[in-house]
Image (cartoon, rainbow, N blue to C red):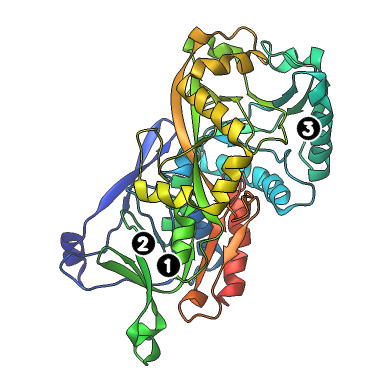
Amino acid sequence: MALPRILAASTLRCYTIRQSHKLLALSTCRQFLSTSNHEPEYDIVIVGGGIVGMATARELALKHPHLKLSVVEKEDKLAFHQSGHNSGVIHAGIYYKPGSLKARLCVEGLQLAYEYLDKEGIPYKKCGKLIVAVNDKEVGRLLDLYDRAIHNGVPDVELIEGNEIKKYEPYCQGVKAIWSPHTGIVDWGLVTEHYGKNFRDCGGSIYLDFKVTDFQLTEDSKTGTTAAEYPVKVISNGRAVRCKYVLTCGGLQSDKLAKLSGCSEDPRIVPFRGEYLLLKKDKAHMVRGNIYPVPDPRFPFLGVHFTPRMNGDIWLGPNAIFALKREGYRWLDIDTKELWESVTYRGFQKLALQYLAFGFKEVLFSAFPRLQVATLRKYIPDISASDISRGPAGVRAQAMNVDGSLEDDFVFHRESGSALGSRILHCRNAPSPGATSSLSIAKMIADKCRTEFSL
């Protein structure tokens, strides 16, 4: 088909990549024609335009320049959900079990992230992080964290006394703290868009508004036709692309995508919304960098912390609320089918019973944000109820097992005994800190694709 006909018949969409003090417009091709049966053909299709999917697509394009690659994303822009609704922190690798894959990928990812941000000219702030013990009971757990940081090779981490805290955070108090100077902040949504630009510069294609509804093995896959070289159809509302292999990085939809190719639904994705508060602008000077609590092992989530943003805002939180919809950023966002699937899941029922009191408290904090002030004042006593207001929210794709345990490691599935399933590799869970570790995770997944698909 001649170029003028392609341009006339195709729907072209532009999305923007924001760079410091300028806008860079990039066209993202839409080669699906409402009046044509043309189905583009690729070696690998990556499902999911979040930060892990785009980082992996970029890595595959760099490692295998001979491959024809495509990304399909169900929303009208990249990084629409988790990748664009997170705290924006560049983590250093303190919290993770020594020797674990998460710890290694985070420490490696930290270095790769800063190198990439510098190379691409993406603005960031290396503002540091304090993990503060506010009483003697928390000191033991803080010391354990410090040991982890040392074993994990976290760069330049320090253990400081209470009287040294104000050197880093003048308005903060505590009895002892860990100082991590290389923790930073960035706009991870912007980073994802840059991954997308790199991918396209390598010849990759990105299709937006493409919600995957099915995977099919084509009828001509056993014939000697050219189409048999691309036997898998990735389908979306009557449109399709064909490919040899598929990699899914679906985040909040990862279990549903896996089920489409015959995989088990477990681990199941149960959505938890994290709601932030905003500190008043005239009090923003009280927070220089990230201020985090010492984790309480009795509870599944970290708890309230102070997070500066690239635009100067200070986020306080988040809480952890069971979301009534997978993409439910507000209480009024309800999907009855998804809600029923979650509440009838045995794993969720076990978790809810185990943490009933914790969950009730989080709901109260959501309904009455001022109840969180007492917790905030443990760290910065000068904060009052009048200094806070409701802020943004994000939804965490929490992978959960049927026994109620939270999946805290990477999960990959491929149905090797199935003609269709053997050609589809699912990244079922890419645990926090997925954004910080995105480049190192991408290297790992690209290597796994090379092995699984014999690239």
Q: Which mark is residue 212?
A: 2
State how far apart marks 1 and 3 are (Cα): 45 Å
- Indicate the quadrant containing the N terminus: top left, top right, bottom left or bottom right: bottom left
User: Residue beneath label 3, please?
Assistant: 157
Identify which amino acid the numbered label 2 is placed on. Answer: Val
User: Residue beneath label 1, please?
Assistant: 260
Identify which amino acid the numbered label 3 is placed on. Answer: Val
**Residue 104 visible (yes or no):** yes
Q: Nearer the viewer, residue 442 or 210?
A: 210
* Within-10-Å neighbours for mark 1: few <14, some 14–19, many 20+: some
Identify which amino acid the numbered label 1 is placed on. Answer: Leu
Q: Element at badge 1?
A: helix
Residue located at (83% from left, 43% from top) = 151
The quarter of the picture where residue 160 lies is top right
- Indicate the quadrant containing the C terminus: top left, top right, bottom left or bottom right: bottom right
Nearer to us: label 1 or label 3 = 1
Q: Element at badge 2?
A: loop
Is 104 drawn above or below residue 317 in the view shown?
below
Residue located at (41% from left, 49% from top) = 340
